[in-house]
Amino acid sequence: MNLFMRLLIILLFASFSSVGQKLKKADKVMITNLQAHIVYLADDKLEGRRAGTNGEKLAREYISSQFQKAGLEPKGEQGWLQPFEIYDGKQISASTLLFINDRELKLNDEFFPFVFCPGSSLEAAVSPALKEKGVPWFDDLKDVLEENKENPHFDLTNAIKTIATKAAEKGATALFVYNSSGITDNLKFDGKDNSQPTVIPVVYLTAKACKQYLSDESATLDIRLKTIIGDKKRTGHNVIGIINNGAPSTIVFGAHYDHLGYGEDGHSMLPREHGTGEKQIHNGADDNASGTAALIELARLLKLSKDKNNNYVFIAFSGEELGLFGSKYFTEHPTINLATVNYMVNMDMVGRLNDSSKALTVGGYGTSPSWGSVFTALNKQKYFTVKFDSSGTGPSDHTSFYLKNIPVLFFFTGLHSDYHKPTDDHNKINFTGEAIIIKYIESLVTLTNTKGKLAFQKTREPAASTAARFNVTLGIMPDYTFSGNGVRVDGVNDGRPAQKAGIQTGDIIIQLGSFDTNSLETYMQALSKFNKGDKTTVKYKRGEEMKEGNVEF
């Protein structure tokens, strides 16, 4: 331990004493441990702990070793681990190729198939100027771009799909599109687009390829095309340990340990104007090395507890930043009997207890009628103010448990200017405050251990999100792990537009008003077009049946 680290711990201990908490030997150990956990998990060598990367591997190995050191038993599917697949969109297979006149074109540099291009293989001799049955067609986007250059609602990708459909109806076997205008088209392979494949393959030719092959439209081109679009996947891992007291019920404690990596998935809040063009590591000290560290220390404390009225399961989730992948997978493939779960405690961003306001937000207060008396007893402590949020849903892993009718609690010290930025580093963590929160949760567990299995209660309103909000909402919880066409509904809030439109859990939303919702991204884009008071329709699939309902926001 270097001199800086020693001085920091001395300051932390002094801070702990300043809030009136007696500093015991156990408290000193906890603060030292918290610092060690967070410093390691938020180190640059873990490269932001993006799910499915080597950084995640280093993190899960560390967490597993700490669980073992705390005396937990493995409760994953493979020892401590529970692997799960992360759908990462579509990708162009390396087998995709295009030859023109026996010369192979370079993928992305000279051509690319669109994401909605079906798998295909064809050979043909064709003149770009002719549009005949049984051969590929060529289409210049110049006219449609110039006609719509002042139209802010024009969607070029949808226009290309329409052109392809009409070409297929007239006998075209493929469609090659290009742009000879001076208008930038911004077309690219969009792996997040879950559109249904078009009838015929659709391929974009870059300006470089056009210069080489389309300068004489009357020339005959020998074409050989093969397109294969496949799923892009990676594997995340939950880390699961248990303290088995032989009790009839189990309390689950969770915290996600993944973060944003270098921001590859598009969730970074770093302003573009501040970008240097260099990749920057998002270390995620508060989000959520802090919660992971709390999970480890809580496991260590509860292993020493003499109270055996509950078993304790500790889960470090991955894939949370991508849409609750890990917690959803666990609740769909539990390694324990979910029917025995008493309640679930989620710790996400618990490292910034503010020194002036000392405010802690606790979500899920309304998910059990028992929480009122529990927190009345707990809040006799004087170290921080507790703000309650009734909702059982929100932008973190407790939501997956609430949707299984399990009481939940969500501990959160609030957003800050470093949220989802490279500046969320360990030197900004309030280790003292986090230690107090852990002791608070430990006290909560002690109180509930005498109450038996808590009753579940549904809540009405979704919790405030840590993400950008729209003016309107349908009132659904989307299934972020769904990889098909549309937005699958994982939950429906009572009294909200989706419920009034007849939508149920498991339905797949296909269209909102005139806007296709083939992916979560296009669904959010569609929502942004509406304001409170607007009326529209929603189309959705239930099994193989297509349904439509009326929506008023």
Image (cartoon, rainbow, N blue to C red):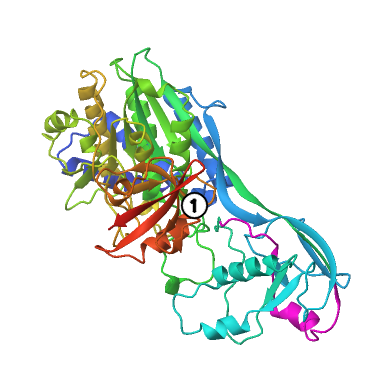
Quadrant of res 128: bottom right
Q: Is residue 106 magenta?
A: no
* Residue drawn at point x = 59 percent, y = 45 percent: 234
Quadrant containing the C terminus is bottom left
Which amino acid type is shown beneath numbered disc 1? Answer: Gly
Q: Is residue 86 left or right of residue 223?
A: left
Mark 1, other Cα within 10 Å: few <14 / some 14–19 / many ≥20: many
Q: Is residue 131 above or below residue 304?
A: below
Q: What residue is at 24 percent from the left and 63 percent from the top?
A: 533
Residue where numbered disc 1 is placed: 486
x, y percent for residue 343? 30, 28
One can see residue 23 in this view = yes
Apparent side of residue 72 relative to residue 162 in the rendered image (left or right): left
Q: Callout 1: helix, strand or loop?
A: loop
Determine whether, in the image, residue 99 is placed left or right of residue 25. right
Q: Nearer the viewer, residue 329 or 78?
A: 329
The residue lying toward the viewer, choosing from 378 and 112, is 112
Of 404 and 438, nearer the camera is 404
How far from the left and from the top, in percent, is residue 473? 31, 55
Residue nearest the viewer, comparing 264 with 368? 368
Residue numbers of the magenta segment: 195-222
